[in-house]
Image: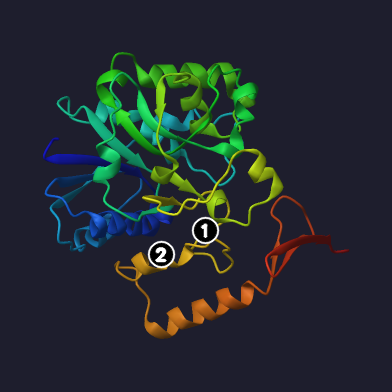
Amino acid sequence: MSDNINIYLSTDKNYFDKCIIAIISILHNHKGNEKLIINILNSDLSENEFKIANSIKADCQFEINFIHVEAETFIKYTKNLDMKYLTVNAFYRFLIPDIAPAEVKKVIYLDCDLILNGDICELYEQDIDGYKAGVIEDKLLKYRLSDLNLKSDKYFNSGVLLLNLEEIRKTDLLNETFEFYKNHSNNLEFHDQDILNGIWDNKVKFLDERFNAQSYCFLRMKKRYKKTGVQRINNPLIIHYTGSLKPWNIYCKHKLAYLWIKYKQLSPYRVNKTDLIKFKIKRYLSNILYIIKEEKYNNRYAVFIFGIRFSFGMKK
């Protein structure tokens, strides 16, 4: 194995704290001698963010690099798309084969809404020779295979990618992604993820689910989940807080949300004990009763009573 492990994340100012907490979890769990080269793709970070990153201390060897990306390069990918909660930096991962040094053959890409629960070497050591990437299935989105007319029998989540740059560089990734976007822009529900599933159809190796344990693995097992083959994951290496269950929100039914709080408290974004207790009390109470306004509808609210969701409208 190389003495270095290259890791890429992509963020903006609004998500930078989550990025840092993900990095803290990576460093805290790395026990090997390999140096971790952490690269943060961004277009709007400032000296303040650089100082926060440079303040991080860890027992392992590491360095953090900031790679500036011109956002305008990827604005074309957002035309005709409903970006929902995503920002343009979701597409920055397409640049990694061009940005990474020529001698680097394999890298890891990670979303920021996750934490490591073990040594990242376990993922890096997976054999992906002959494949574009090592990926993990998203069992709830299998319907996208027919929507995109794909040949594969599995659809993958793009938040954790073990990239085989030697294989990817045999073609022009940026050109491939934009061509797929142009031909399918009216049918891209999950943006960069749909694009990567499209251009790498039957060209990826599916790895064990523990390398990207998505939120549905930790929820109450609904019938529709069981039909898709969803099972509990008891020893996740990477806990990915997919969907709306974000551990920094007051209401979060994720069974491992507390682990994210643990790494936040090891980060520059830690809060004092009083504020932490207040947050935990609010979260406990939200599990009994929680009301939020639904973003998709006017004057409509979702009510969670002991985790069971109800929806109702309000007259003006």
Residue annotated with mark 1? 246
- Point 28% across, 22% down: residue: 129
Q: Which is more foreground, mark 1 or mark 2?
A: 2
**Residue 27, percent from left and from top:** 23, 56
In terms of secondary structure, where does tag 2 sit?
helix
The three-letter code of the residue at mark 2 reads Leu
Marks 1 & 2, CB-CB < 8 Å contact: no
10 Å crowding of disc 1: few (<14), some (14-19), many (20+): some
- Point 54% across, 18% down: residue: 182
Mark 1 or 2 closer to N-term?
1
**Residue 312, percent from left and from top:** 83, 61
Left/right placement of residue 70 relative to residue 196 reads: left
Closer to the camera in the image, 19 or 78:
19
* Residue 97 sits above or below residue 92 on the image: above
**Spatial CA span between label 1 and label 2:** 12 Å
Left/right placement of residue 172 relative to residue 234 reads: left
Q: What is the residue that sits farthest to the bottom in this orientation? A: 274
Q: Locate the N terminus by quadrant.
A: top left
Q: Locate the C terminus by quadrant.
A: bottom right
The three-letter code of the residue at mark 1 reads Lys
* Residue 250 sits above or below residue 146 on the image: below
Q: What is the residue that sits farthest to the top in this orientation? A: 170
The disc placed on residue 259 is 2
- Point 70% across, 47% down: residue: 223
Where residue 308 sits, quadrant-wise, is bottom right
**Residue 65, percent from left and from top:** 21, 46
In terms of secondary structure, where does tag 1 sit?
loop
10 Å crowding of disc 2: few (<14), some (14-19), many (20+): some
